[in-house]
Image: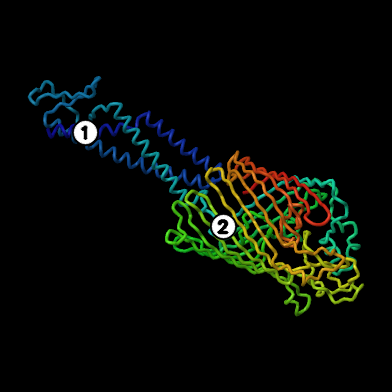
Amino acid sequence: MRNNKQLIAAVALSGLIGVAHAGEKEELLKLRNTTVNLIKQLVKQGILTDKMAEDMIKQAEVDAAKQVADSKALDTKAAASASAASAAAAAAGVATGAAVGKEGVGVVTATAGSAASREAVPADEVRVAYVPDFVKDEIRQQVRTELRDQVVDDVLQKAKTEQWGLPNALPEWTKRFKLSGDMRLREQSNFMADYNQANSFINWQTINSQNNFNGANGISGAGANAFMNTTQNRNMARERFRLSIDAEVANGLDAGIRLATGNTPNPVSTNQSLGNTGAQYQFALDRAFLRYNAFDNNKFNWLTAMAGRTPNPFFTAGSEVVWDEDLSFEGASATVRNKLGSKGDLSDDIGGKGPVVYATAGIFPMQTSNLISGLSARDKWMFGGQTGLEWGFDNQDTLQFGGAYYDYQNLKAVLNRTGAGLCANNTGDQNQSAPQFMQGGNSLVSICNANDGTPNGLVGLATDYKILDINMLYDLAVFSPIHVKFSADYAKNVGFNPNKSVVLANYGTDYAGKTNAWQVKVDFGWGKLNTLGNWNLFTGYRYVERDAVLDAYTDSDFHNGGTNVKGWMLGGNYALVKNVWLTGRWLSGDVITGPRYGLDIMQLDLNTRF
């Protein structure tokens, strides 16, 4: 029995020696060519350089040569073991033979006493048993698999070590930067109402600008540009491009920069009108700020602080009654949040986010002057505060609510000290109260102390602005992925005081308080336009009296911007591909008080973002 075991071991070892036949060589050659072609493709794609590829192939050849040498040594050792086993079996008088049939391997033995059947084996000859094809196939497949896995592991390990095409291959500082942006192409048509009258609305912004803030000639100095267009329809092609760079400065602290097209004196529009005889566009710094976010142990963002030229820190429910969506804020703000979870009195966070209460406060310089000392008391500021609630329910509905108060300082016009008829001699400090930007609608007064019944010189705001603003948004997700959003906005200028106004007779005697503004809106459709075929529709109504909000910062599209306007809005969005969608809007507005001035605006947009 012991001799039989030795014989079987000899047969197995001898079978391993015969693995590398012609078929195996073909398979190994195919595997080698595949690996070489893979390396060439990596070079073609730019992941590897030619030198790196040559070094890899040379190193692989060295490793292969070593493996072949080791394999030959192992084969020699196996052959020696097989020879020793055969010699031991022959010495015991066992004759070995192998017959292959349909049933496999057969072994014929003869007794030690049968001398006629015993065949002498030369001392320098080694006999091995026949190995069936299925055994060879199994061994071949195992060798091929192990070799393939080893090659792949070597390539992946080398790629990881040398950082081929991985983010780690870039310098560490580049990981802290994020680039994003958007582009919008717009076709806009303005349709004037038939009942509009020419020269019925004065363009006070043009008057202030063209008089260079010295109040030289008032309306006469502005010439043909002194009045708004109220009778001629217009078609405009416009473009907006914005590029943002966000950088991680430290843990929780990041810096943000945004460049944008647009007219630099206009704070509420980044549109660039096409048709400038090939002149290049303005590309200005729209935002530049630092932002700090603090998180608790549960990764809840309980504090956000910003300073510089920042995004709007206040919740608006998507309304542009008080703040245009393109407006950037100059100053500093902070928002503190507190989450009322399952341990709070307002717990309803099973499956939802639960209620979060927040408070925001900010201080924002609006207009400062360095003309002479002592003017800091006249610098214009806005102090704002808001408190609100964000509540995510277990059915995926969300409720957002915010109540804000915005207190403007030193905005009301101050009459200069120049005598009647001498407005052209005004100095800069006497005209400090003139606003730098207006869209139209607010009650105005002449800063020049002429009192001659004509609107001479510069103009300023006739009243103070202290605005109470309440916003609400409810997102109904019962039809998810279709959402229905209901939003509302109400604003009132509680700072209006006719007894303290400085309005002169030449601007009309009807100076009753017009200080309310409101808007309601409904959105219906997909919440995100990131897949072909996603869509949403919206409609709403807006009513903004002339002194309800500051006309400089309200929506710049509806009725071409400003207050003293009411009307409808209707539109929709449709996604073409990811990050590309179409927008269509129809804005129909008319003035509330004064001469009739109706304006319908159609906007067709192609939007992209990256």
In this orientation, does residue 251 appear? Answer: no
In which image quadrant can residue 292 be found? bottom right
Mark earlier in primary sequence (1, 2): 1
User: Could you say which disc has been placed on residue 174 in the image?
Assistant: 2
Can residue 482 be seen here? yes
Q: CA distance from mark 1 to mark 2?
A: 63 Å
Q: Is residue 254 above or below residue 369?
A: above
Label 2: which secondary element:
helix
For this orientation, the residue located farthest to the left is: 113
Residue receiving disc 1? 10
Element at label 1: helix
What residue is rendered at 71% in x and 54% in y?
A: 543
Foreground pick, 376 / 542:
542
Q: Position of residue 13 (x, y in %)?
A: 25, 35
Left/right placement of residue 340 relative to residue 437 reads: left
| Left or right: where 367 falls relative to 39 | right
- Residue furthest to the bottom: 374
Q: Amino acid at mark 2?
A: Thr
The crowding category of the residue bearing disc 1, from other C-alpha atoms within 10 Å (few below 14, some 14 to 19, many at least 20), is many
> With respect to residue 542, does 41 lie above or below?
above
The 10 Å Cα crowd at callout 2, few under 14, some 14 to 19, many 20 or more, is few
Q: Nearer the viewer, mark 1 or mark 2?
A: 2
Residue under the point 20% across and 34% down: 9
User: x, y percentage for residue 359?
Assistant: 56, 65
